[in-house]
Image: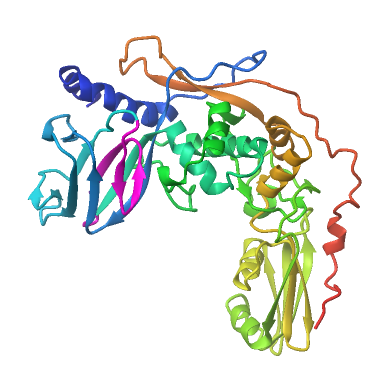
């Protein structure tokens, strides 16, 4: 199959070069092993070429794509479907035969690709503009629109969407490295797309969100990722860890050596402390999904993790008690409206009271913590060294960039490099700075 497609490429040079980038740089990235490389000295050069990512940006029974430049449409096998010499707004739908319908005409295929235009051009969908090309495909009787875009161009939109672009440059650089690592780790040749455009993946709103400051952070960290054993690390992040990072093990049962529970005095935000009150009737309704205890009268954290998050909850009601453990304990807290799971419980005259710290799961980088460290003078490498201890800052490298573009020679690998040996700056801190023991008792001073 690859040889047949390659022959088509060789006869359609323009499309060949395009699809080599679209499919080989993204799809084949993870087909090859990502071996650990010998430690390099100093900072590696930026990659001489760029990966492309495929981002699902829209789905529906009908879409409209605006293309303000001359463009061509191609079938999956490389044949030219149509060439427009003018700017066009294309109505898209699905035919009874299951093909893409363009401006009322059956395109004869469930997949159609529109290459990117000249540098600086964009295509627009639902008021948002995007760099790169567009893959239109029919799935389950509906349409999917997939933006095929260079990784660094993708990050220009993602970083300011995930972190305020007015924040410190070093914090933005840390966010850029994390976002790049996540995207690289999601490249999948067998999937129809690599990433979605929502919070389920990374928020990707298009060029309208781009900012000069955050784009600078992307450019200054070009190609850099967090690496572990020669592969992209799992770079989780949340808004505010509430003063303690959570390990991936305690939250999701994932054993990652570079994900640990430790105090973080720099993570301070408007949600560093919060309190929620619920009437007993509402709390009882929520608790009924976790145990048959009747009318709820108390909630107690009967076991805490090292970071002060509940491993086990005891629910007490008119019909008895129920013990909620593990992920279900966190689910119960979220069902009550908790901003994080670093919580303790009490009560007042009106009902259940939940006091908490932080916003989000608390695993990996704390965005407010990164901003706090940057404000204290730490650079992004130091920040990354704290939130991902034992991991390394690495560089993705596309092999064969100086060789002819043949299927046999296009591959990819990650080369790990130690930029700095970053000592944990908090090793000498006593646990009293943000002691989880402060959360081990439900007897907290609630008001009201």
Q: Quadrant of residue 279?
A: bottom right
Q: Please identify the dominant SS of the magenta region.
A: strand
Quarter of the image with the C terminus is: bottom right
**Residue farthest toward the left in the current orientation of the protein:** 105
Q: Is residue 137 visible?
A: no
Q: Say which residue appears at 18% left-offset and 48% top-offset.
A: 90
Residue range (magenta): 120-142
Q: Is residue 162 left or right of residue 251?
A: left
Q: Is residue 235 left or right of residue 198?
A: right
Residue 41 lies, with reference to residue 376, above or below; the image says above
Q: Nearer the viewer, residue 336 or 87?
A: 87
Q: Is residue 223 part of the magenta span, yes or no? A: no
Residue 201 lies, in percent from the top left, at 48, 48
What colour-coding does the image apply?
A: rainbow
Residue 61 lies, in percent from the top left, at 23, 59
Q: Say which residue appears at 78% left-offset and 81% top-offset.
A: 347
Q: Quadrant of residue 300?
A: bottom right
Q: Nearer the viewer, residue 314 or 189?
A: 189
Q: Is residue 139 part of the magenta span, yes or no? A: yes
Q: Say which residue appears at 76% left-offset and 34% top-offset.
A: 378
**Residue farthest toward the top in the current orientation of the protein:** 403
Residue 215 lies, in percent from the top left, at 52, 35
Q: Is residue 56 left or right of residue 109?
A: right
Residue 211 lies, in percent from the top left, at 51, 40
Q: Is residue 218 left or right of residue 92?
A: right
Q: Is residue 311 visible?
A: yes
Q: Say which residue appears at 33% left-offset and 26% top-offset.
A: 21
Residue 291 lies, with reference to residue 439, above or below; the image says below
Q: Nearer the viewer, residue 35 or 40?
A: 40
Quarter of the image with the N terminus is: top left
Q: Quadrant of residue 277?
A: bottom right
């Amino acid at each position: 199959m690859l040889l047949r497609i390659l022959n088509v490429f060789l006869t359609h040079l323009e499309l060949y070069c395009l699809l080599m980038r679209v499919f080989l740089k993204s799809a084949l990235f993870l087909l090859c092993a990502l071996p650990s490389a010998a430690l390099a000295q100093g900072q590696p050069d930026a990659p001489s070429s760029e990966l492309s990512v495929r981002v699902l940006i829209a789905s529906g029974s009908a879409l409209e794509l605006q293309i303000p430049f001359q463009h061509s449409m191609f079938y999956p096998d490389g044949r030219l479907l149509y060439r427009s010499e003018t700017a066009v707004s294309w109505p898209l739908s699905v035919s009874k035969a299951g093909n893409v319908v363009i401006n009322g005409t059956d395109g004869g295929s469930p997949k159609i690709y529109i290459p990117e235009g000249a540098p600086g051009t964009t295509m627009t969908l639902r008021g948002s503009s995007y760099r790169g090309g567009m893959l239109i495909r029919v799935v389950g009787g509906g349409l999917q629109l997939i933006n095929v875009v260079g990784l660094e161009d993708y990050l220009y939109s993602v970083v300011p969407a995930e972190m305020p672009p007015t924040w410190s440059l070093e914090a933005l650089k840390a966010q850029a490295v994390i976002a790049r690592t996540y995207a690289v780790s999601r490249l999948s040749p067998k999937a129809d797309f690599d990433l979605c455009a929502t919070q389920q993946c990374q928020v990707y709103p298009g060029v309208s969100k781009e900012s000069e400051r955050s784009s600078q952070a992307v450019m200054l960290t070009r190609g850099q990722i967090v690496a572990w054993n020669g592969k992209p690390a799992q770079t989780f992040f949340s808004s505010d860890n509430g003063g303690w990072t959570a390990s991936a093990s305690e939250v999701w049962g994932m054993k990652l050596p570079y994900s640990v529970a430790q105090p973080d005095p720099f993570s301070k935000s408007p949600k560093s402390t919060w309190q929620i009150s619920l009437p007993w009737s509402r709390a009882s309704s929520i608790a009924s999904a976790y145990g048959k205890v009747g009318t709820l009268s108390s909630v107690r954290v009967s076991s805490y993790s090292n970071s002060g998050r509940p491993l086990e909850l005891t629910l007490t009601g008119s019909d008895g008690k129920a013990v909620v453990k593990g992920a279900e304990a966190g689910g119960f807290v979220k069902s009550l409206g908790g901003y994080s799971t670093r919580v303790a419980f009490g009560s007042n005259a009106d009902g259940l009271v939940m006091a908490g710290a932080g916003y989000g799961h608390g695993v990996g980088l704390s965005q407010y913590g990164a901003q706090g460290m940057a404000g204290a003078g730490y650079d992004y490498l130091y920040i990354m060294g704290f939130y991902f201890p034992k991991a390394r800052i690495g560089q993705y490298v596309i092999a064969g960039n100086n060789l002819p573009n043949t299927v046999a020679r296009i591959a990819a690998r990650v080369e790990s490099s130690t930029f700095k040996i970053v000592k944990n700056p908090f090793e000498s801190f006593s646990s009293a700075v943000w002691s989880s023991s402060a959360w081990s008792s439900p007897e907290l001073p609630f008001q009201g």
